[in-house]
Image (cartoon, grey):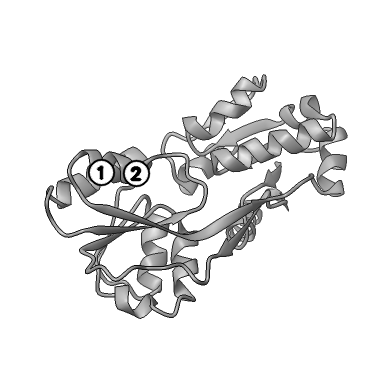
């Protein structure tokens, strides 16, 4: 299959390498550019643990001058890949929800009781789920600190537009709702929405798929679990 990978780097090229090893052709076109917030204020609190929903947060923290202060804390992550990134960054105590934002909330609630020490949520500037809000409603104290931001591209690169217009792509891989939104916005701007929705749209979760379905996508496929391995399992050899 010839596939378009839309996720930010360095994950986009890593996914593409996996696809190529499996015999697919992969065209990488990140729709978001991730930037760390170097001066993020981590506060003066005595944190009881960290909440992380993306590897981008771990990468951003790696360059923070106070990162070493957090290494001894337990880390609650949304998925296994993020937990792996946390361990590689030096966090020894990590636990993954192996799911989505709701699964992460449930995990934290099983591990932490209301009235316990405050938790630090290392977040992106744009978030689709309210993890901190759900935990706060349950009685936990959560401080959200933005440590990275994702900048949207303004248009699809010419090689992508040419491939879509010629119907040369078999599928498009979407890993976040925001990147799916950007894909649609760029397609509309180029007056090629129909061509953009013609390939199979492989989505990490129902939430990611929502804007594609709303835009009229009729060939939307959703991974059975919100993780890369499950998404790639959907691809035929």
Image coords of residue 87 (percent x, y): 35, 69
Q: Nearer the viewer, residue 119 or 181?
A: 119
Query: Is disc 2 surrounded by few (<14), some (14 to 19) or many (20+) residues within 10 Å?
Result: many
Choose top left, top right, bottom left or bottom right for residue 182. Answer: top right
Q: Which label is found at residue 88?
A: none
Q: Pick the quarter of the image with the N terminus.
A: top right
Is residue 99 shown to the viewer in this render? no
Q: Name which residue lies at 78% across and 30% down.
A: 188
State yes or no: discs 1 and 2 in contact (Cβ < 8 Å). Answer: yes
Q: For the point 87% across and 47% down, which residue is it?
A: 158
Image mark count = 2
Whether residue 234 is situated above or below residue 122 in the rendered picture: above
Q: CA distance from mark 1 to mark 2?
A: 6 Å
Q: Is residue 198 left or right of residue 177?
A: right
Q: Secondary structure at mark 1?
A: helix
Quarter the C terminus occupies? top right
Between 146 and 180, the one nearer to me in the picture: 146
Query: To which residue does mark 1 refer?
Result: 135
Would residue 124 be found to the left or right of residue 12 on screen?
A: left
**In the rendered image, which residue does mark 2 sit on?**
131
| Foreground of the two, 220 or 115 | 115
In this view, 222 is above or below 27:
above
- 147 up-or-down from 125: above or below: below
Q: Position of residue 38 (x, y in %)?
A: 52, 71
Residue 41: which quarter of the image?
bottom left
Task: Residue at 38%, 40% (x, y): give it.
Answer: 130
Q: Is residue 154 left or right of residue 68?
A: right
Check disc 1: other Cα within 10 Å, few if <14, some if 14-19, many if 20+. many
């Amino acid at each position: 299959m010839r596939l378009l990978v839309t996720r930010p780097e360095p994950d986009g090229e890593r996914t593409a390498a996996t696809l190529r090893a499996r015999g697919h052709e992969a065209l990488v076109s990140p729709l978001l550019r991730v930037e760390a917030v170097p001066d993020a204020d981590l506060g003066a609190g005595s944190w009881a643990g960290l909440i992380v929903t993306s590897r981008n947060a771990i990468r951003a923290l790696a360059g923070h001058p106070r990162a070493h202060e957090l290494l001894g804390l337990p880390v609650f992550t949304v998925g296994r890949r993020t937990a792996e990134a946390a361990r590689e960054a030096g966090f020894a105590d990590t636990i993954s929800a192996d799911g989505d934002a709701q699964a992460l909330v449930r995990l934290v609630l099983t591990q932490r009781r209301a009235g316990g020490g405050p938790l630090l949520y290392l977040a992106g500037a744009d978030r689709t789920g309210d993890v901190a809000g759900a935990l706060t409603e349950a009685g936990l104290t959560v401080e959200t600190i933005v440590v990275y931001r994702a900048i949207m591209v303004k248009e699809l690169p010419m090689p992508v537009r040419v491939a879509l217009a010629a119907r040369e792509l078999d599928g498009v891989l979407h890993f976040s709702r925001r990147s799916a939104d950007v894909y649609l916005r760029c397609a509309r701007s180029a007056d090629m929405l129909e061509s953009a929705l013609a390939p199979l749209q492989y989505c990490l979760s129902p939430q990611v798929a929502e804007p594609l379905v709303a835009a009229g996508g009729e060939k939307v496929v959703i991974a059975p679990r919100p993780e890369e391995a499950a998404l790639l399992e959907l691809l035929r050899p």
